[in-house]
């Protein structure tokens, strides 16, 4: 079965710092994770194409990722960053579309999870920026915490021409072992036809040392029921996933969680949805 990894990261600390990697828990990530490193895990795990996703909210990172993707057969798409609230956001997006590798630009995102305002996504300036992304023919990745699902649904309803891709299922409280109110809020987002979700990032929301597939299953089942396989896509969240699991373990968990689907449904989750949504 063809695999498209719809969510992973790359960084070179010599070129750009990753200020979010702080403290002893994240220390294993404080090194370079280069395209050659990703190739080493993607190739042996049958990954045919991937989407590399931004990690820092600075203008310089997205052109670097685009240039890297432009020279790579493996990197099929880039989800980058620009300031959603900038008055000239349309011009900024247009400038990104003139960068080397610009044909690989498929979407944008912002670290909404770090915004202190729980309703940041529904601010007028943000909604204006989201509208500009829609007009540019790109999609918008949602990196949020569970408590921001409601605001995400309101934003998606306000900008119906934009496809919203939910990263990591909205970071459900897997380690705490409860599903509500996350499940209800997720269903509210999934009820909107312009929303899609990534089966990604779950192992790092679980207990990093003692997680089992059974811990992830209730959350995957809610998401699969709410969105349906045709609106879900696999993402490894490499290398962040390595805090809790190896790449083969993450892939094996995703296969286990989708084992009850038909072959066509599994093809959608592991390749078809990402290919369609991101236009790979």
Image: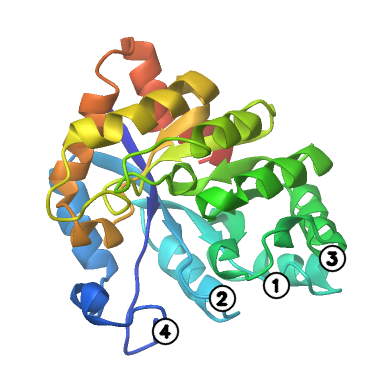
Locate residue 24 relative to residue 15 in the image: left or right: left
Name the quarter where the N terminus is drawn.
top left
Q: On the image, numbered disc 1 is attached to which residue?
A: 83
Q: Nearer the viewer, mark 1 or mark 4?
A: 4
Label located before the other in sequence (4 or 2): 4
Q: Secondary structure at mark 4?
A: loop
Q: On the image, numbered disc 3 is attached to which residue?
A: 125
Q: Residues within 10 Å of mark 4 (few under 14, many from 20)?
A: few
Q: On the image, numbered disc 2 is attached to which residue?
A: 57
Q: Residues within 10 Å of mark 1 (few under 14, many from 20)?
A: some
Circles 1, 4 touching at the beta carbon (< 8 Å): no
Q: Residues within 10 Å of mark 3 (few under 14, many from 20)?
A: some
Say if residue 148 shows up in the picture.
yes
Quadrant of res 209: bottom left
Label located before the other in sequence (1 or 4): 4
Give the residue displayed 55% in from the left and 69% down from the top. Answer: 114
Compute the Cα span from label 1 to label 4. Answer: 18 Å
């Amino acid at each position: 079965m063809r695999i498209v990894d719809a969510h992973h990261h790359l960084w070179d600390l010599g070129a750009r710092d990753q200020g979010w990697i702080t403290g002893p828990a994240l220390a294993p990530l404080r090194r370079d994770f280069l395209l050659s490193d990703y190739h080493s895990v993607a190739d042996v795990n049958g990954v045919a194409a991937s989407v590399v996703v931004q990690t820092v909210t600075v203008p310089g990172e997205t052109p670097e990722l685009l240039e890297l993707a432009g020279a790579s057969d493996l990197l099929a798409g880039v989800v980058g960053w620009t300031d959603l609230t900038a008055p000239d956001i349309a011009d900024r997006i247009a400038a990104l579309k003139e960068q080397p590798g610009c044909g690989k630009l498929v979407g944008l995102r912002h670290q909404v999870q770090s915004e202190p305002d729980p309703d940041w996504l529904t601010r007028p300036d943000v909604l204006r920026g989201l509208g500009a992304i829609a007009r540019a023919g790109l999609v918008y990745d949602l990196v949020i915490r569970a408590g921001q699902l409601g605001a995400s649904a309101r934003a998606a309803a306000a900008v119906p021409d934009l496809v919203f891709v939910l990263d990591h299922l909205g970071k459900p409280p897997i380690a705490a072992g409860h599903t509500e109110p996350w499940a209800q809020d997720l269903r509210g987002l999934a009820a909107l036809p312009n929303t899609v979700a990534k089966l990604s990032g779950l192992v790092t929301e679980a207990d990093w040392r003692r997680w089992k597939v059974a811990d992830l299953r209730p959350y995957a089942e809610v998401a699969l029921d709410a969105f349906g396989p045709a609106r879900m896509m696999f993402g490894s969240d490499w290398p962040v996933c390595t805090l809790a699991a190896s790449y083969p373990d993450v892939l094996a968990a995703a296969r286990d969680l989708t084992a009850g689907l038909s072959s066509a449904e599994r093809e959608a989750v592991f390749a078809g949805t990402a290919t369609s949504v991101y236009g790979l």
